[in-house]
Amino acid sequence: MLKNAWIISWAFLFAIGFSQLPNFAQQYLQALNSAAAELETQVESFRGIARSEGLSLEDYLGRLSGNADLAVGKTGGEIRRIYQRQVTLSGQRDRLLSSPKWLRPVLIAQTPDRAVLERTAALYQFTLLLDPLYAAAGAVLSLLLTSLFSRRRKKPR
């Protein structure tokens, strides 16, 4: 009887825990979109400066990076870092937006942006909204784990 209660409790906890994944993925996507949009604004500003000088962004970055003034060269390196991060975050955002909602938690787990993930986790608030698909997956996983661990303990000596 106690064993059954333990199994049901684990299944319930896993169901609730897994149900948080779609909501967390949505929060992550919103934070990712905000970060990508801000970087897109900055990169577009740098493109505008480059255009005003008759240069592409790459040529402009090359000119800055190759400048004899160390501060200007470092500025070019920083702008290149901002541009690369913008490309990375925008790409991840676009992949998530084009994927089915049920797959987003898996995609985020495969290639999360650490800074966005940490900010999302810091602000995330647990809810009791249950996603049926992920609740079922959590319950099944807990039952599989319980079965696996109970078989290991029952091995004959």
Image (tube, rainbow, N blue to C red):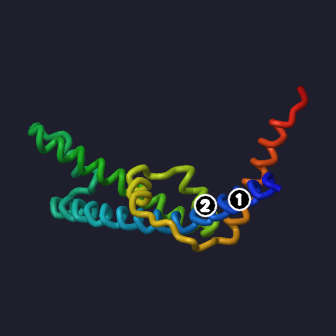
Which quadrant of the figure contains the N terminus?
bottom right
Q: Secondary structure at mark 2?
A: helix
Q: Amino acid at mark 2?
A: Gly
Which quadrant of the figure contains the C terminus?
top right
Horizontal and vertical percent for residue 107?
A: 58, 56
**Residue in front for this viewpoint, 132 or 50:** 132
Horizontal and vertical percent for residue 117?
A: 44, 55
Judged left or right of residue 42, residue 113 is: right
Horizontal and vertical percent for residue 124?
A: 44, 64
Earlier residue among tags 1 and 2: 1
Q: Amino acid at mark 1?
A: Ser
The residue at which mark 1 appears reads as: 9
The crowding category of the residue bearing disc 2, from other C-alpha atoms within 10 Å (few below 14, some 14 to 19, many at least 20), is some
Numbered tag placed on residue 17 in the rendering: 2
The residue at the far left in this view is: 69
**Residue in front for this viewpoint, 33 or 50:** 33
